[in-house]
Amino acid sequence: MRFGFTKSVMMAGLLASSGAALACADVGCDPVWSLFGGAPACHNRAVIAPGNDSRVNLLALLRTSAGLGLIDPVQGGADYPKPGYDEESFGHTFLDWGMLKRSWKPEGELGTLPSDVGPCERAAVAVPQFNAALEANRGVPLAERTALAAARAGLAARCDAPASVQAQWPGGIVSAPGKAFLDYLAASDAFYAARWDEARSGFAALQSAPDPWVAETARYMVARAEFGVALAHAMDEYGYFDGLKAVDKAAAVRARAALAEYLKAYPAGRYAASARGLERRAMWLSGDFAALGERYEALLAVAQNEGAPLVDLIDEADSKFLTTSDNANPLGGGLMLLAAADLMQMRVADPSDPDATYGKMLDAATLASQQAQFLRAPDLYSFLQANHAFYVGKDYARVLQLIPDDAKRSSYTPLAFSRQVLRGQALAAKGDVNEAGFWLELLGGAKALWQRPTVELGLAMNWERHGKLAHVFAPDSPITDRMVREILIAHAAGPALLRSAATYSTRPQHERDAALFTLLYKQLSRGDYAGFGASLALVRGDAPSEGLMAFETGEPVALGLFTKGRTASAGFACPALAATAATLAANPRATHARLCLGEFWRLSGFDGFTTLDTAPARDQLGGAAHEFPGTPTTRGAFYAAAIADPRSAPADRAYALYRAVNCYAPSGYNACGGDEAPKAQRKGWYDTLKREYPRSPWAQKLKYYW
């Protein structure tokens, strides 16, 4: 379901040129507003948890080991990253890997050469390097340099030529270094044409070339050619990697050996950094995950504050080691990788989807066997044990034993914060009377980004569960997060609390408008017409009634809809909404007034708008308290009542028949709410309208039934 104030928002979108209409915005990610982190979702929490993206967990663990937060205030700024289009409903409580990555690596930031370019692009990019080396070697005569440079340009130009087209190499190259450059071009031509064996032998023959650039580059390119052999049959017809099963692993092993030889000969060479990265690729392609895990762990240990390289390394380690199905033992990595893998194997079904499964579950014995590996990180190990106790064992008392109360710190690293939040979750699960006090104490040190809103969520849920919703909206309330407050406004608050929230002069206008809109909508839809009339006086004169309204972005609430919205259409006269509500307050069964209320509903775009009528699950924010009385009524019910009531005026009954049929136009599905009418029933309404009210404009206008 979609919650209030997400993409379908409390008002999913109210447009109004000819009245307001709900705009479909059912895209992106809707966070589950609870602290439960056991199941994967489209969003993450600042709390390290099994259900988080493993990259988020890994970043949090690495930054903790350096005593740092999730983002660098210098690199990413001191404020929350700007949300993407599909992240607008996250508020400041949820995040995802893309959001974190953007804070470290601004969009558009690229290396010197994008990793996804093809061989022909690389052939063109490498031209200046060849020319610079050629120019630097004065042992190559000018005429030969000119001819060789032209041949290198031609090599790039003919990269996409058919294999049957032979390269035309310059004649008259007689100097020893000139011949080395020419042989290098021939090997390169074979490389770019995917003639891997020819390329490999050509480059191998040049490792002792008289030109230093040719000798070094050729030694490096031997390894690159071996990678070509390794992957020759591992790409499908569309150019996508077909998995390690199709890799020539012997060639991958040879590539790794060639890289080692290059690094031994040129430890600080021009390709040294690339060679070290390619060593990881060779380990992966050859299936040596034990060595790959050790390499990643060593690199991650020194990369906690390296910005873009850090997130790139996490991406690589995650895809090549942690989450690939090719790695039969993701628990075989070093400390940080092991912790991230452990958490992945503690994933459990979300309460809303109890049948979901997430692969092999980590058993208690396996976790216990890891104790020696975590001797240097006892807090991390006890945290892993506590996660297992909470999510797998549901042993909440054990969680409290493993994680002592440490809620009075002045600040928290990601791991320290995650430990305390998990303790708070255990207190909640046990129904501990001290839970609220714990959250209140934890607020003091929850200063890093995403931390305070997370604690506020825990505290707000406690108060909601225990009938203390008024505490959330008290003048001195510590619950300040807009999303938390407005979700409770939408789903939990009753009339008195909504009225109070709508008149808190110290609260933001957006929140006050949200509270008043919710109050008016629910009073009107649940039949409290007298209350609606009294509340209508609170609508300020300049309240907007048009435009797209999306709560999560803080855009204006279309509150003026209730005072300035359309209430009648051509041929069916209705007074202002206030007058209709007053009539219904005096006589709730007044047929014409009910049909007029249906007109307001239809013209305002409330058809299908169930956000304020559908509660979240009980274990989520807004799902435990339902203080607003009554059951919402749909305009479809108004039409059915008018049709069934023999006392209905002919004009009203004819209009009700016309509208009841049109509820199904043109899709055949009920757009008006209420009970679904079968096609035979719709035909009956159509026939009744044509037979009993043939001269009414509605009978003459209606051409079909659906």
Image (cartoon, helix red, strand yellow):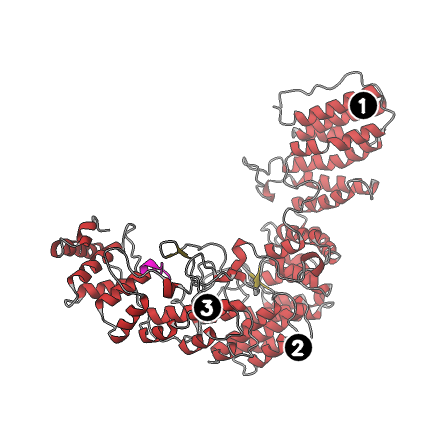
Q: Are marks 2 and 3 in contact (CB under 8 Å)?
A: no
> At which x and y percent is residue 634?
30, 64
| Residue 380 seen in the current view | yes
Q: Secondary structure at mark 3?
A: helix
Q: Residues within 10 Å of mark 2 (few under 14, many from 20)?
A: some
Looking at the picture, does residue 278 appear above or below residue 653?
Answer: above
Residue hosting label 3: 513
Q: Residues within 10 Å of mark 3 (few under 14, many from 20)?
A: many
Q: Secondary structure at mark 1?
A: helix
In-image side of 30 versus 592 (left or right): right
> At which x and y percent is residue 161?
62, 24
Cα gap from disc 1 to disc 3, whole angstroms: 76 Å
Along the polypeptide, which appears first: circle 1 or circle 2?
A: 1
Residue hosting label 2: 406
Residue 604 is covered by the magenta coloring: yes
What segment carries the magenta color?
Answer: 602-610
Along the polypeptide, which appears first: circle 1 or circle 3?
A: 1
Residue hosting label 1: 145
- Name which residue lies at 15% across and 68% down: 647
| Residue 335 seen in the current view | no
In-image side of 595 versus 649 (left or right): right
Q: Residue furthest bottom?
A: 433
Q: Residue furthest left?
A: 691
> Is 429 or 264 nearer to us in this picture?
429
Looking at the picture, does residue 629 appear above or below residue 229?
Answer: below
Amino acid tagged 1: Arg
Q: Residues within 10 Å of mark 1 (few under 14, many from 20)?
A: many
Query: Quarter of the image containing the N terminus?
Result: bottom left
Q: Secondary structure at mark 2?
A: loop
> At which x and y percent is residue 317?
66, 52
In-image side of 688 versus 94 (left or right): left
